Image: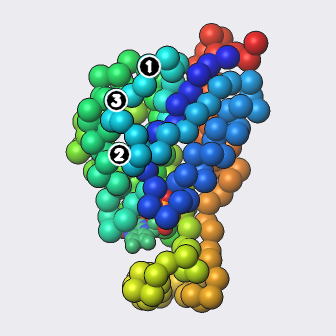
């Protein structure tokens, strides 16, 4: 059994939901998993974990700055553990190359190059946005040629099977020490 920490950043909650889902997959596989909202946490990686999966989402082309701060600050510890990164964005659904570019920029900015990386589609949560954000997102999305512009509903692009596979593959690579007892 492995103890796995999932520190994440989120602005509208989708990365938190994905982190919870990953934790559920890992627990169902016999491991201990905890999520950590970095916005409300101390910035040191807590000890006692065998592996770490960092999550962050994209707004205006960038991951949350506080996730970058966390990674920079804890890079030596992250480099000494099996660790992965997942990035959540609309691009991961609509323009995967762009989503990969965001990850490459994050890696350049933090100096951290995790051995496993995934990009997951996020969500357009029109019904939860305030007026200005709702109109701005409708304009951006419509301008990209998408028809997902009905602001009376939300659009969820996260492919949960892909998230499950990512978690299962990550944990499978931890080796026999991490096998469920
Ligand atoms: C104000 C705003 C700006 C965004 N900017 C981008 C962007 O530049 N590129 C992109 O691919 N997705 C962008 N998105 C989409 C978010 O990445 C997506 O909604 C994701 O699910 C947010 O995750 P979170 O809820 O964990 O913060 C943006 C969303 C909002 C609300």
Question: Which of the 4 quarters of the picture holds residue 32?
Answer: top right
The image shows residue 7 at horizontal and vertical percentages of 47, 39
* Mark 1 surroundings within 10 Å by alpha-carbon count, few (fewer than 14), some (14 through 19), many (20 or more): few
Where disc 3 sits, the SS reads loop
- Label 3 close to label 1 by CB (< 8 Å): no
**In terms of sequence position, does the residue under pointer 2 or pointer 1 come before the other?**
1
Question: Which of the 4 quarters of the picture holds residue 14?
Answer: bottom right
Considering only vertical position in the picture, is 67 above or below 52?
below
Question: Which of the 4 quarters of the picture holds residue 59?
Answer: bottom left
Report the side of 65 relative to 14 (left or right).
Answer: left
Residue ID for mark 1: 47
The image shows residue 151 at horizontal and vertical percentages of 57, 87
In space, the residues marked 2 and 1 are separated at their CA atoms by: 18 Å
Report the side of 81 relative to 159 (left or right).
Answer: left
Residue at (30, 29) in percent of width and height: 75
In terms of image quarters, where does ligand 1 lie? bottom left
Where disc 1 sits, the SS reads loop
**In terms of sequence position, does the residue under pointer 3 or pointer 2 come before the other?**
3
Looking at the picture, the colour scheme in use is rainbow
Q: Nearer the viewer, residue 153 or 80?
A: 153
* Mark 2 surroundings within 10 Å by alpha-carbon count, few (fewer than 14), some (14 through 19), many (20 or more): many
Residue at (63, 68) in percent of width and height: 156
Where disc 2 sits, the SS reads helix
- For the C terminus, the image quarter is top right
Which label number is shown at residue 75?
A: none
Which label number is shown at residue 44?
A: 3
Residue ID for mark 2: 67
The image shows residue 81 at horizontal and vertical percentages of 44, 20
Residue at (59, 22) in percent of width and height: 3
């Amino acid at each position: 059994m492995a103890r796995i920490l999932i520190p994440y950043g989120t602005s509208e909650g989708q990365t938190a939901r994905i982190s919870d889902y990953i934790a559920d997959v890992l627990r169902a596989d016999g491991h201990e998993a905890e999520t950590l909202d970095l916005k409300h946490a101390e910035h040191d990686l807590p000890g006692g974990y065998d592996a770490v999966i960092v999550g962050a989402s994209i707004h205006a082309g960038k991951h949350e700055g506080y996730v970058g701060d966390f990674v920079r600050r804890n890079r030596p510890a992250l480099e000494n553990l099996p660790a992965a990164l997942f990035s959540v964005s609309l691009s991961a659904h609509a323009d995967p190359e762009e989503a990969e570019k965001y990850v490459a920029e994050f890696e350049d900015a933090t100096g951290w190059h995790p051995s496993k990386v995934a990009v997951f589609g996020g969500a357009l949560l029109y019904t939860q946005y305030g007026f200005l954000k709702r109109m701005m997102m409708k304009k951006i999305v419509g301008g990209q040629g998408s028809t997902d512009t009905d602001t009376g509903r939300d659009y969820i692009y996260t492919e949960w099977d892909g998230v499950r596979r990512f978690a299962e593959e990550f944990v499978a690579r931890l080796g026999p020490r991490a096998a469920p007892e």
